Amino acid sequence: MTHANVVYWPIGMINTFSEMIEAMLLKLEEVKKTDMEAYQTYFDRVNIEKLWVEYCHLFNHRQYLDKQANNEKVDFLLKYMTEYSVCTSLIDGIEGYRIK
């Protein structure tokens, strides 16, 4: 998490990585139709990478997010950090980013 700061994750890079990840997830939809087990394996791998991008977006650039987008990122992070047992020590801090 040392490298999660804005110096390493400018907004342009976040947007580029987000677009790439979404494109990968979209391509996986074809695999879902033929091999659900492979789909789930690849989905989880890509989704874990998405966690880092979404975390860095929320942590460094939340000023670019409206309330709904902000809270969707919080929900996504909480759900999948818990599901994948990734950086669970950050979960309490992430809830603090929710806009009420």
Image (cartoon, rainbow, N blue to C red):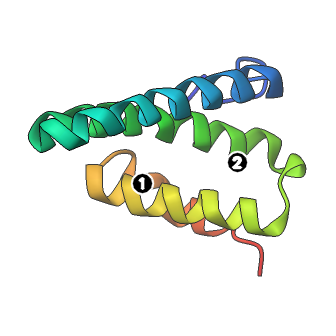
Left or right: residue 24 versus residue 94 is left
The quarter of the picture where residue 25 lies is top left
Secondary structure, mark 2, is helix
Residue placed at 89% from the left, 50% from the top?
A: 63
19 or 96, which is in the foreground? Answer: 19
Question: Picture coordinates of residue 60 (x, y %)?
Answer: 77, 39
Say how many tags the image has. Answer: 2
Q: Is residue 74 left or right of residue 87?
A: right
Q: Amino acid at mark 2?
A: Leu
Return the residue nearer the eye: 49 or 35.
35
Q: Which mark is residue 58?
A: 2
Tell whether label 1 touches label 2 (CB within 8 Å). Answer: no
Can see residue 40? no
* Disc 2 residue crowd, few under 14, some 14–19, many 20+, Cα 10 Å: many
Q: Amino acid at mark 1?
A: Ser
Location of the C terminus by quadrant is: bottom right
Q: Position of residue 73 (x, y in %)?
A: 62, 56
**Residue at image location 39% in from the left, 39% down from the top:** 47
Q: Which labelled disc corresponds to residue 11?
A: none
Q: Earlier in the sequence, mark 2 or mark 1?
A: 2
Find the distance from the CA under tag 2 to the CA under tag 1. 16 Å
Please name which of the two marks, 2 or 1, marks the residue nearer to the observer.
Answer: 2
Q: Which mark is residue 89?
A: 1
Q: Mark 1: which secondary structure?
A: helix
Residue 69 x, y percent position in the rendering: 73, 60
Q: Residue at the spot x=63%, y=63% of the render? A: 72
